[in-house]
Image (cartoon, helix red, strand yellow):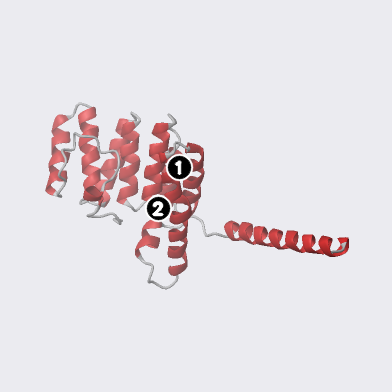
Amino acid sequence: MSTTIVTSIRTAVVGALLLVMGTAVAAAAFTPMDNDWFFSSAYADRDGTLQVHSLLINVDLNHTDRAAVSIGQADYRSAIADLAYTLARFPNHPRALMLLTAVSKLTDRPALPLVYFERALRLYPQYALTHAQYGGYLVQINRTEEGIAKLNTATEIDRNLVIAYVWLAEAYAKTGKPELAQKAAARARELGYQRPPQEPASTPDSSATSTSSSSR
């Protein structure tokens, strides 16, 4: 095969690879940002939401789920990168926020999730679960009064959000307010919470969030 033909083939292959890479970069650059996770996850069948719902599925498959695997492998740098990708596109993504708080504890970087929570609430302040998650995390990093304020906001938005009362009970117990702790714990039990709120409940499990995981 002549040198000219080989050179032409190489040029064509390189050109094709550059085209593919350029297309991927362009697609990433134009991926819709700042989408509402609650709306995107709940209303896939509505006009105008199918595209963003498909984006959510794709982001979870390729980034959120991968971050969880990376955490299990102690590859925290990769986990943070994937979670940052997810949260850039869905700032109030509950699972991504939860995983980021886990990374912050494992890497002793308590400030890591704060900017993400603040951004989520700035864009979408209407969701009780985001306030509750932020409040629960603030309590864990000893910013207890701020955390209690966020948790109370969550209960004002949604009086049936079980995990908010669970975390409130823990926060009040931590600050030496047993009566308020008992009141919050009683409300959690009224809503069907089984585990005593005094036990650790650092992540919103299914029993605590099933009542109103999409609460506004």
Q: Write the residue at 42% across / 45% down.
A: 69
Q: Residue furthest top?
A: 176
Q: Amino acid at mark 1?
A: Ser
Position of residue 125 in the picture relative to residue 82 (left or right): left
Give me the disc on residue 70.
Answer: 1
- Label 2: how many Cα within 10 Å (few below 14, some 14–19, many 20+): some
Query: Dot 1: what SS?
Result: helix
Q: Write the residue at 31% across / 49% down.
A: 129
Q: Position of residue 86 (x, y in %)?
A: 47, 51
Give the position of the N terminus as an image quadrant.
Answer: bottom right
Q: Write the residue at 44% across / 50% down.
A: 64
Q: Is residue 110 visible?
A: no
- Label 1: how many Cα within 10 Å (few below 14, some 14–19, many 20+): some
- Disc 2 to disc 1, C-alpha distance: 28 Å
In this rendering, the answer to whether 129 lies above or below 21 is above
Q: Position of residue 7 (x, y in %)?
A: 83, 60
Q: Residue furthest bottom?
A: 47
Q: Write the residue at 20% across / 26% down.
A: 176
Position of residue 86 in the picture relative to residue 125 (left or right): right
Q: Is residue 22 visible?
A: yes
Quadrant of residue 57 within the rendered picture: bottom left
In this rendering, the answer to whether 125 lies above or below 44 is above
Q: Position of residue 13 (x, y in %)?
A: 73, 61
Residue labelled with disc 2 = 124
Question: Which circle's residue, 2 or 1, is located before the other in the chain?
Answer: 1
Position of residue 206 in the picture relative to residue 190 (left or right): right
Q: Nearer the viewer, residue 155 or 78?
A: 78
Q: Amino acid at mark 2?
A: Tyr
Q: Position of residue 156 (x, y in %)?
A: 25, 48
Query: Dot 2: what SS?
Result: loop
Q: Nearer the viewer, residue 92 or 109?
A: 109
In this rendering, the answer to whether 126 lies above or below 113 is below
